[in-house]
Amino acid sequence: MNFIVQGYPAYAYTGGRPFDPNLPAIVFIHGAALDHSVWHYQARYLAHHGFASLAVDLPGHGRSPGTMRNSIEAMGDWVAAFIEAACTERAHVVGHSMGSLVALDTALRHGGRVAKLALLGAGVPMPVGDAFLAAAREDSPAAFDMQTAWGHARQAALATSAIPGLTLPGASRQLVARAHPGVQHADLAACHGYAPSIEAIRALNVSTLVIAGRRDTMTPLKAGQALAKGIPGAKLLALDTGHAMTSEAPREVTAALRSHLREAGAA
């Protein structure tokens, strides 16, 4: 489904059901160089269990045209505008990796648009190594390999996918390599440069769930623990998964999101 956001079309996957603005809406935000498809399991399940799912493609990603945003703050502004464009006063905002920073920023600077918050594979700050940034700047296949290797638990390549027909690392690499030139580097640089004030995070007043992976090498468990500790009242859930938790542990992530969000009126 397409919306018009800041003057350009914006695509959002609705989980196989027509978007109903009368249901509690969930805006899902993907990570660096990815798109809505990383949420297909969660968005589809929750769309069939009382929510209106909106798994967006950020500008310049996936099916959304327009100029990619070069900062987390600009992406947060876009998400707030998206929620307004969807004719929804407020929405639950769920983000993974870079998307978790965008979700957090949306709550920090557009709090009236956020009903509840869920941050997956999150950490503040979220530094990116020089070698990774350099390879991404050149759109090198090495950068795709780095994101794939570090984005999964060490034994994920040997595991049987919980989603039939899906090979996790292979699908992830193909998705990253499909991004438009320059997108991966812009996204990684935005993560690297994002530095919200600790005081603002400590003043956040929104129900928050942080989901961290015990085998996550990109945003280690301790980063999620620190973030959850800094947000008043935030809950922390640690799962036996790597960074790509939406595909490595799809059922566990979905159950956690449903439990966290259902108090707001889901069936």
Image: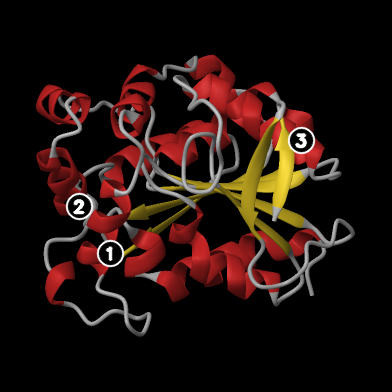
Question: Which mark is drawn over residue 113?
Answer: 3
**In the rendered image, the vertical position of residue 67 relative to residue 229, given as above or below:** above
Q: Residue 182's quadrant in the figure?
A: top left
Please tell me which residue lies in front, 57 or 106: 57
- Expressed as whole percent of the image width and height from the top left, the position of residue 20 reads 84, 62
How many other residues sit within 10 Å of disc 1, few (<14), some (14-19) or many (≥20)? few
Q: In this view, does 152 lie to the left or right of 112?
A: left
Q: In this view, does 179 lie to the left or right of 11?
A: left
How many other residues sit within 10 Å of disc 3, few (<14), some (14-19) or many (≥20)? many
Q: Do the residues labelled 2 and 1 touch (CB within 8 Å)?
A: no
**Residue 183 in sight in this render:** yes
For the point 62% across and 67% down, the residue is 259
Q: Do the residues labelled 1 and 3 touch (CB within 8 Å)?
A: no
C-alpha separation, residue under disc 2 versus residue under disc 1: 9 Å
- Expressed as whole percent of the image width and height from the top left, the position of residue 250 reads 42, 71
Q: Which of marks 2 and 3 is in front?
A: 2
Tag 2 secondary structure? helix
How many other residues sit within 10 Å of disc 2, few (<14), some (14-19) or many (≥20)? many
The amino acid type, in three-letter code, at marker 3 is Arg
Q: Residue 140's quadrant in the figure?
A: top left
Tag 3 secondary structure? helix
The residue beneath circle 2 is 148
The amino acid type, in three-letter code, at marker 1 is Ala
Tag 1 secondary structure? helix
The amino acid type, in three-letter code, at marker 2 is Thr
- Expressed as whole percent of the image width and height from the top left, the position of residue 68 reads 48, 27
Q: Are marks 2 and 3 in contact (CB under 8 Å)?
A: no
Find the residue positioned furthest to the right. Answer: 22
Question: Which mark is drawn over residue 171?
Answer: 1
